[in-house]
Every structure is written in structure tokens, then in C-alpha cells.
Amino acid sequence: MEKEEELKKEIRELEEKLKDREASLPAHSVRPQQMLAIEELEIALEGKKKELERMIKTVPSVD
């Protein structure tokens, strides 16, 4: 479960970074590198969420 908690923490951190990046975008004249940074965060976030989902599916629940 330690790995699961670590992944959840990483997901929260990536979500916060993404939120900050999006909030810092200017209304006009967005630079390509700004959009690239956001896309990279989105890809990393998606990967971590999929990794967590796979982990949850493979760990049998204890009832």
C-alpha cells in the first residue's frame, strides 16, 4: 500500500503543477513552450493515474 500512497501523492502534485501552469497562461499570445509544458504534465498525470488504476486492479481487496 505504500506504493499506492506514493502514487496518489505524485498525482496530487502533478495536478497542482498543471493547475498552476494553466492559471499562468496569458489570455493572448501563448508561447508554444508553455503549451508543451502543459501537455507534458497532462501526459505524466495520465500515466500515473493509469499506473494507480492497474495497481488497484491487481491488488486483491481485503474484506
Image (cartoon, rainbow, N blue to C red):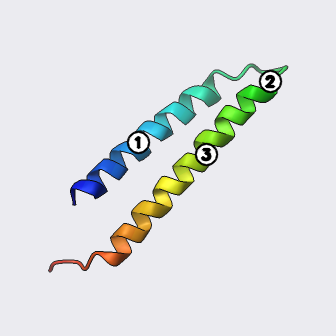
From what the image shows, is residue 23 above or below residue 52? above
Q: Earlier in the sequence, mark 1 or mark 2?
A: 1
Q: Is residue 24 left or right of residue 8?
A: right
Q: Earlier in the sequence, mark 3 or mark 1?
A: 1
Amino acid type, label 3: Glu
Residue 10 drawn at (x, y percent): 39, 43
Q: Which residue has dot 2 on it?
A: 30
Which residue is located at x 30 percent, y 48 percent? 6
- Mark 2 Cα shell of 10 Å, populated few (<14), some (14-19), many (≥20): few
Q: Quadrant of the N terminus?
A: bottom left
From what the image shows, is residue 7 above or below residue 60? above
Residue toward you, 38 or 63? 38
Mark 3–mark 2 distance (CA, rounded to whole Å) = 17 Å
**What number of labels is visible?**
3
Which residue is located at x 16 percent, y 78 percent? 62
Mark 1–mark 2 distance (CA, rounded to whole Å) = 25 Å
| Element assignment for label 1 | helix
Q: Which residue has dot 3 on it?
A: 42
Q: Are marks 3 and 2 in contact (CB under 8 Å)?
A: no
Q: Which residue has dot 1 on it?
A: 12
Q: Quadrant of the C terminus?
A: bottom left
